[in-house]
Structure formats: structure tokens, C-alpha cells
Image (tube, helix red, strand yellow):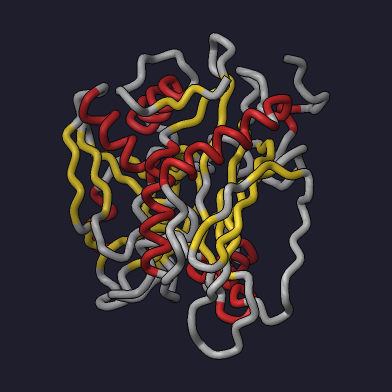
Amino acid sequence: MEKKNLDWGSLGFAYTRTDLRYVSNYKNGAWDEGCLTDQADITMSECACVLQYAQTCFEGLKAYTTEDGRIVCFRPDLNAQRMADSCRRLRMPVFPEDRFVDAVIQTVRANAQWVPPYGSGATLYIRPFMFGSDAIIGVKPATEYQFRVFATPVGPYFKGGFKALRVRISDLDRAAPRGTGHVKAGLNYAMSLYNIMDAHDQGYDENVYVDSATRTHIEETGGANIIFLKGNKLVTPNSPTILPSITRRSLVQVAQEYLGMEVEERPVALEEIGEFDECGLCGTAAVISPVGIIDDHGKEIRYAGMGEGIRKLYDTLTGIQMGRIPAPEGWIQVIA
């Protein structure tokens, strides 16, 4: 199949409209059959629930061209599960998990020419999302919803490739105890926009959030989970207000089963982060990005950047995704 004529290696992490997307509507208590469409624009009431009360959630995953030329997705069943959890927390109807995976497959197949070639460094980013679409003026859930999936080719999430990131401990909070930090709700990201722009203005790549109750434990960043390494040990924060990253969960299994590392998923105290050798941010968009400095209000904690541990984790996980390394059962969804 002939690919689109793009400069794949120069792509940034930005939206490019592709040919088709998947749409399904919920009305009168049921989802319709859904279909592919070339219509990228959405028309809705000015009083739509998503516009008034931010009733929306989303997912993110990628499609790749493997070394042997197949087009695959990485663990879309877990994205389906996570969106179902988000919907339940936001009082939205769950889009059936099997239909979620099928919608992803349909969307990628329909845009196969947009899947970057193997070795280009680019991927096809897939964005499933759902929102309350009917007019709601009282504070209550919508009664009608739309589920959509679009795809767009992207380059690296952080500019500069494996340049070690400089991040800061944030004075603002990402999520409240017993709030929505554990689901992928659009409102979680809206509240972080001021802070990420301020971080960029101050010369930082990201914010590291601590728990809002005691401000003594590391949680995650605005767009990724965080991991720490010391010797042959991987440590990742554990908290009920952290989004359960599929990439982080996969890295934990890779560390244990492929690299023979000791893994600890536990609360990580702010005062202990200087004891680690390496630090990285992990998520679908970035996979793993090494952290060079965490600035804690003028106190700089320095790490090895792309050290041996982060490199091994990155190489192994991307090797699995790209077909160079055998994958655990169920991790790779072959699309074409």
C-alpha cells in the first residue's frame, strides 16, 4: 500500500486531518450501529452538555508499522477498559469495550495510508473520545452522547527526541482526593493548561504534581506518569488519584519479565526523590522521556538523563511494539 507523501521524520505532535473517522450516537438509551465518515466537523447545540459542564472523556493510543510491514495497535483493550471506567465516573453511557476495539480497527484500516512507515520515528495517534451532545442547562448529565475516533500522524511528543527534560515541582494541584484524577476526563486537563503554559514560560518542560492532601508524595505530571530507577530497581508512585497509564503498566511488566528488574509500586515521598539514579516520564504519546532535572523550588535534583535503565526499558517496549521482540499474549492487535 502506498503511503501518503509526507515528510514523516519532520512531523511534530500536532493534528493533521486524515480521511475517515468513526462516529456512533447514543439516544433513547441505546447506541446506534456507528459508521465511518469523512465529516471531521461537529455540529451541536450551543447548550450542549459538553460545552456547559465539560462532560467528556477521551483515550489515546497509537498504530505502528512493524519491522515486517504489518500495521498494529498496542493493547487497545486496556484503552477500552479505561474509557469504560471514565464513563462510569462521569455518568456517561459505556461504549461497549468490544465495539471500542472494533472502532479503533476500522479507523486505522480506513487511514492505513497515513500510518507512518517503519523506522520513520513517527506513528499514527488514535484519539477515541465521547461527549454529552444534547442541550442541558441544569447541572445534570446529558441524555444524548457521541462517541468518535479519529487518527492523525504525529512525531515525538517532546521536542528534541531524547533530550533530558527539565521539570519542576508544581505549587498547584492536579487532582483532589476522591476526585477524578484516576479517570481520563477532559476537565482534568483543562485545569492543568494554565500551569503547563506557565512552566514553559519559566523554562520547564513539565510540572510534577504532588498529592494535594499532604503535598509530601509524588504523583504524576500533567500528561504522563513518572518512574524512578535505582540500580536494578524500578519504582513508580502508587496513588488513587493517578491516572493508570497503560504505558506504565506495560513497563512494569517489561521490567519484571524481560529485564529481570525488581519493581516497587508504592507511595514515593518527595523527600526521597534525590536518592534515585534515573527518572522518566511515560505515556502513550511520549513512551518514555528521560528527566534530567527536577527543580523543587530552587533545589535541583539531577538524574542521569537517558541512562542505561531508561534506555533498556525504552528499547524493549518499543521493540515489542514494532515487532522486533516477541510480545506477551494479547499485547499486539494486528490491523493489516
* Horizontal relation, residue 30 to residue 137: left or right: left
Location of residue 226 in the rendering, given as x and y in whole percent from the top left corner: 37, 50
Q: Which residue lies furthest to the bottom in this view?
A: 138
Quick one: quadrant of the C terminus? top right
Location of residue 213 in the rendering, given as x and y in whole percent from the top left corner: 27, 78
Nearest to the observer: residue 3 or residue 205: 3
Location of residue 167 in the rendering, given as x and y in whole percent from the top left corner: 48, 56
* Horizontal relation, residue 281 to residue 265: left or right: right
Q: Please, is residue 284 above or below residue 176 in the view?
A: above
Q: How many numbered callouts? A: 0
Q: Please, is residue 149 above or below residue 263 in the view?
A: below
From where the camera sits, is residue 73 visible?
Answer: yes
Q: Residue furthest right?
A: 5
| Residue that appears at 38% across and 42% down | 78
Quick one: quadrant of the N terminus? top right
| Residue that appears at 53% across and 35% down | 162
Nearest to the observer: residue 46 or residue 69: 46
| Residue 215: quadrant of the picture | bottom left
| Residue that appears at 36% across and 15% down | 326
| Residue that appears at 37% across and 48% down | 81
Location of residue 200 in the rendering, given as x and y in whole percent from the top left corner: 61, 61
